[in-house]
Image (spheres, rainbow, N blue to C red):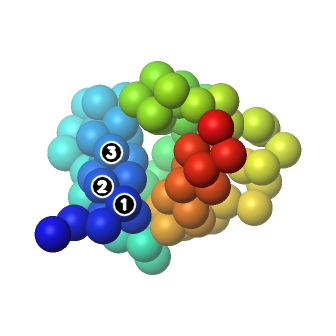
């Protein structure tokens, strides 16, 4: 059985792959900038994909603390719980 975090990580992988045009696998420890080699514009496109997928709005000020896919997953989980 997959946990919510696993499903969220799967969606992060899917959204990233869609934006960058290649298959991407992420784990909790995957560093978004270093390991995925995405720039800020690409990251914003990934965030927009995730906002559409989860029907949430991710505030830009909350992204400043996001470094890993696990951080992003936790942020999405928190925003979904408050929605």
Q: Mark 1 sits on what residue?
A: 4
Asked whether the residues under the numbered discs 2 and 3 touch, taking CB atoms below 8 Å apart as contact, a structural biologist would say yes
Mark 3 Cα within 10 Å, few/some/many (few <14, many 20+)? some
Q: Can residue 35 be seen in this view?
A: no
Asked whether the residues under the numbered discs 1 and 2 touch, taking CB atoms below 8 Å apart as contact, a structural biologist would say yes
Question: Percent from the top left, x then y, of residue 29?
Answer: 45, 76
What residue is at 72 percent from the left and 49 percent from the top?
Answer: 63
What residue is at 77 percent from the left and 49 percent from the top?
Answer: 62
Q: Earlier in the sequence, mark 1 or mark 3?
A: 1
Q: Mark 3 sits on what residue?
A: 11
Residue placed most toward the observer, 81 or 62: 81
Above/below status of 79 relative to 6: above
How many callouts does the rendering have? 3
Residue placed most toward the observer, 11 or 68: 11
Asked whether the residues under the numbered discs 1 and 3 touch, taking CB atoms below 8 Å apart as contact, a structural biologist would say no
Is 26 placed left or right of 34 in the picture?
left
Question: Percent from the top left, x then y, of residue 81?
Answer: 60, 50
**In terms of secondary structure, where does tag 3 sit?**
helix
Is 9 placed left or right of 38 in the picture?
left
C-alpha gap between disc 1 and disc 2: 5 Å
């Amino acid at each position: 059985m997959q946990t919510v975090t696993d499903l969220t990580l799967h969606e992060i992988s899917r959204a990233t792959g869609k934006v960058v045009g290649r298959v991407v696998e992420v784990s909790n420890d995957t560093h978004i900038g270093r390991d995925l080699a995405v720039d800020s514009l690409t990251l914003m496109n990934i965030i927009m994909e995730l906002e559409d997928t989860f029907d949430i709005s991710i505030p830009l000020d909350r992204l400043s603390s996001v470094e890993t896919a696990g951080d992003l997953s936790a942020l999405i989980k928190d925003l979904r719980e408050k929605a």
